[in-house]
Image (cartoon, rainbow, N blue to C red):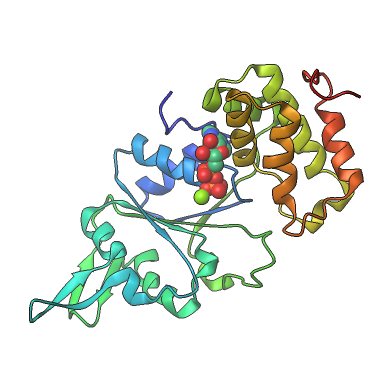
Amino acid sequence: MTTDTYYANGNEVQLFEQAYHQRLPVMLTGPTGCGKTRLVEHMGALLRRPVVTISCHDDLTSSDLVGRFMVTGGDVVWTDGPLTRAVKAGAICYLDEVVEARHDSLAVLHSLTDHRRTLYLDRADEVVHAPETFMLVCSYNPAYRSSLKELKPSFRQRFVTLPMNYLPPDREAEVIVAETGVPLPTATRLVRCATAIRTADEAFHFEPPSTRVLVTAAHLIAAGATELDAAEACVLAPLSSDGAVTDGLREVAVASLAGADTSSTPH
Ligand SMILES: Nc1ncnc2c1ncn2[C@@H]1O[C@H](COP(=O)(O)OP(=O)(O)O)[C@@H](O)[C@H]1O
Ligand SMILES: [Mg+2]
């Protein structure tokens, strides 16, 4: 089992590859923990390109992306930022959670995302033409409303968008088994638990439990935790920051684990 094993959910691997060969930038959308980063790592291995990941946040400046002059031992030297290094290396540059970055910081990407495929380093007075193998990939979670941020439509339209989502239940259970080694029935119950919460009436109140939290829960179970304890700690507790998971929701989650070894918990 290598860390870049990726379970496809449709034709996203093919579309990603086609975009790469046509030198088109890609935008991955979908909920947290559904496999976006894993897909990029997988494509890097498949296309034999290094992946340079940049986690976006609201303090990120264009200088953080392209580089800046730095004083080293009395000399002022231009130092490439991660985006510039990725362009020069012909790598896959992955801007994770790009919606977190300010619009003006992202403006530097425009000339890279169209036919020019060029990075203008105005301050360094340098123009960098992207090699054929350079690819820009961004991701964001459109349902994540609490940040009150949105990408400009004009920015979104520069990309081939690949919408991603959780795998179908049987495939998601396979991922959990492959990642953690728990038995399939355990993985199936964890997926059933997550699905029950994802489809509950109250689901719009919170970010739904992701494949990531199920993998984490399965790791705890592999280490000896009961399924109920693992589900409580990894699936239910993170749903709300104030612990206000309703009894109804907890019941739904617990019922979906029915069939688990509950010998330590009387019912
Ligand atoms: N399609 C998938 N194939 C393999 N593993 C997956 C997949 N989707 C989710 N996972 C598991 O969930 C974890 C979180 O996925 P990740 O790619 O980091 O999510 P995202 O970047 O969308 O937040 C991964 O480390 C992996 O264990
Ligand atoms: Mg990610």
Where 69 falls versus 164 (above or below)? below
From where the camera sits, is residue 119 visible?
A: yes
Q: Position of residue 230 (x, y in %)?
A: 69, 34
Q: Position of residue 222 (x, y in %)?
A: 59, 23
**The C terminus: image quadrant:** top right
Residue drawn at x 27%, y 67% is: 81
Judge from the rendering whether residue 40 lies leftward or rightward of residue 246; answer left or right: left
Q: Position of residue 233 (x, y in %)?
A: 69, 41
Residue drawn at x 83%, y 30% is: 256
In the image, 218 versus 164, the foreground residue is 218
Residue drawn at x 60%, y 20% is: 182
In the image, 133 versus 116, the foreground residue is 133
Judge from the rendering whether residue 65 lies leftward or rightward of residue 189; answer left or right: left
Q: Position of residue 59 (x, y in %)?
A: 45, 75
Residue drawn at x 72%, y 33% is: 229
Where 125 falls versus 157 (above or below)? below
Where 77 falls versus 33 (above or below)? below
Judge from the rendering whether residue 58 lies leftward or rightward of residue 131; answer left or right: right
